[in-house]
Each structure stands twice: as structure tokens, then as C-alpha cells.
């Protein structure tokens, strides 16, 4: 069999922060994130997340997620393994130092078009960019206002309300498209 030269992931590295939905849904999100070339997944606890405590994510769950990552990585011939970070609250994640640009998916009135948010992010020439998605129910008004105060701009993907897993794939895909990462 011929060997294929594995390419390093393109810049900016695409990362996903997602408020934890039901575990089966999160596993699907992890698998698709590997397939789409996401570098890092940050599981979050928010007001509407399925998981309410960090301790609800057991060692067995972490091992299962790693197995999904390894299997998906082999199938997609990726050169690197997606990394799942330790669970944080939404507030802990939002207050992280050195925050990179973020496509914060939100269906409310205050949201700008995703393309506009990403065009502004492109001017920064970032090494990393985040997609931020809520779980079932999205984010509470208080969480949205807190994120806005911390400099995150809500971005809409259109008038439809998307399921958590669909929002993740759409946000990642829009980022990859806008940063010209969908070509050979």
C-alpha cells in the first residue's frame, strides 16, 4: 500500500467549546469534530447543559471519548489527535487568559451574521479560533449578557434553531470555509 504524507493542520487551529449535551450527543459531536479537523474540544457546564457537575464526567466517559477519537482519527487519516480538555464552567472558559477569536453561536436578536464576525476575526490573523455552542436550550440570557460583557460577539447562522450537534458542525464548517480550509 502507498503511504500518504500527513499534513499538519492548517492555521488557525479550529477549537470547539460546547455546553455538554446528553452523552450520546456529545460522543457524536466528538466524532464529527475529529472528521472536521477540530484541534481541541472544551466540554462546558452551563445553565442548560445536561451535565451539572464536573464530577459527572467519569474516568470511564473520558476513556470512551479517547477511544472514539482514536477510531475516528484512523478513519480520517489525520496527523494529530483531537484533544478533549478537562470540563470547565462556561464562566471559567470565558474568563481564560489570552482569549482567541470566537464564533459564538446564538439565535437571539443581538447576533451579527456569522460571516461578519469571522471577517473581523480574519483581520487578527489568529493562530486559533473557537466555535462556541450551547447544549439543548442554548445559553441563558444571563450567560449571553456575561459573554457579551467579556467581548464575545453573538453570531447567527440564520433563522432556524439548530440542535446542539447540528450547531457544532455548522459553526466548525463556517469557520473552516471562511478561513479557506476546505480545499486540498
Image (cartoon, rainbow, N blue to C red):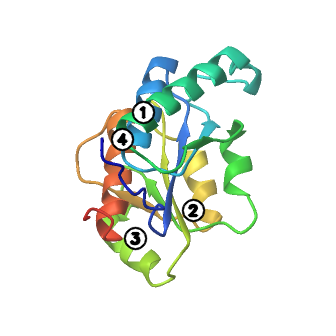
Q: Spatial distance from mark 2 to mark 1, Cα to Cα?
A: 35 Å
Q: Spatial distance from mark 1 to mark 4, Cα to Cα?
A: 6 Å
Could you classify mark 2 by the number of other residues whose Cα lies within 10 Å: few (under 14), some (14-19), or many (20 or more)? some
Q: Spatial distance from mark 2 to mark 3, Cα to Cα?
A: 13 Å
> Sequence order check: which comes first, mark 4 or mark 3?
4
Picture residue at 34% right of the left edge, 73% below the top? 116
| Location of residue 73 in the rendering, given as x and y in whole percent from the top left corner | 45, 38
Could you classify mark 3 by the number of other residues whose Cα lies within 10 Å: few (under 14), some (14-19), or many (20 or more)? many
Taking the view exactly as shown, the residue that stands out farthest to the top is 60
Q: Is residue 169 above or below residue 125?
A: above
Q: 78 left or right of 115?
A: right
Q: Spatial distance from mark 2 to mark 4, Cα to Cα?
A: 36 Å
> Sequence order check: which comes first, mark 2 or mark 1?
1
Q: Spatial distance from mark 4 to mark 3, Cα to Cα?
A: 29 Å
Q: Nearer the viewer, mark 2 or mark 1?
A: 1
Q: Label 3 belongs to which residue?
A: 117
Picture residue at 30% right of the left edge, 47% below the top? 2
| Location of residue 66 in the rendering, given as x and y in whole percent from the top left corner | 59, 28
Amino acid at each position: 500500500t502507498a503511504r500518504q504524507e500527513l499534513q499538519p493542520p492548517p492555521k488557525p487551529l479550529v477549537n470547539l467549546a460546547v455546553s455538554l449535551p446528553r452523552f450520546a450527543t456529545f460522543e457524536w459531536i466528538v466524532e464529527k469534530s475529529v472528521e472536521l479537523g477540530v484541534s481541541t474540544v472544551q466540554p462546558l457546564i452551563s445553565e442548560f447543559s445536561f451535565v451539572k457537575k464536573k464530577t459527572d464526567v467519569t474516568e470511564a466517559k473520558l476513556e470512551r471519548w479517547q477511544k472514539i477519537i482514536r477510531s475516528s482519527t484512523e478513519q480520517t487519516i489525520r496527523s494529530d489527535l483531537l484533544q478533549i480538555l478537562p470540563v470547565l464552567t462556561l464562566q471559567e472558559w470565558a474568563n481564560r487568559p489570552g482569549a482567541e477569536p470566537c464564533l459564538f453561536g446564538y439565535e437571539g436578536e443581538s447576533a451579527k451574521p456569522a460571516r461578519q464576525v469571522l471577517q473581523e476575526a480574519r483581520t487578527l490573523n489568529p493562530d486559533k479560533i473557537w466555535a462556541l455552542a450551547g447544549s439543548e436550550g442554548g445559553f441563558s440570557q444571563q450567560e449571553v449578557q456575561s459573554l457579551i460583557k467579556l467581548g464575545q460577539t453573538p453570531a447567527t447562522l440564520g433563522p432556524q434553531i439548530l440542535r446542539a450537534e447540528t450547531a457544532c458542525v455548522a459553526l466548525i464548517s463556517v469557520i473552516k470555509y471562511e478561513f479557506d480550509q476546505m480545499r486540498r
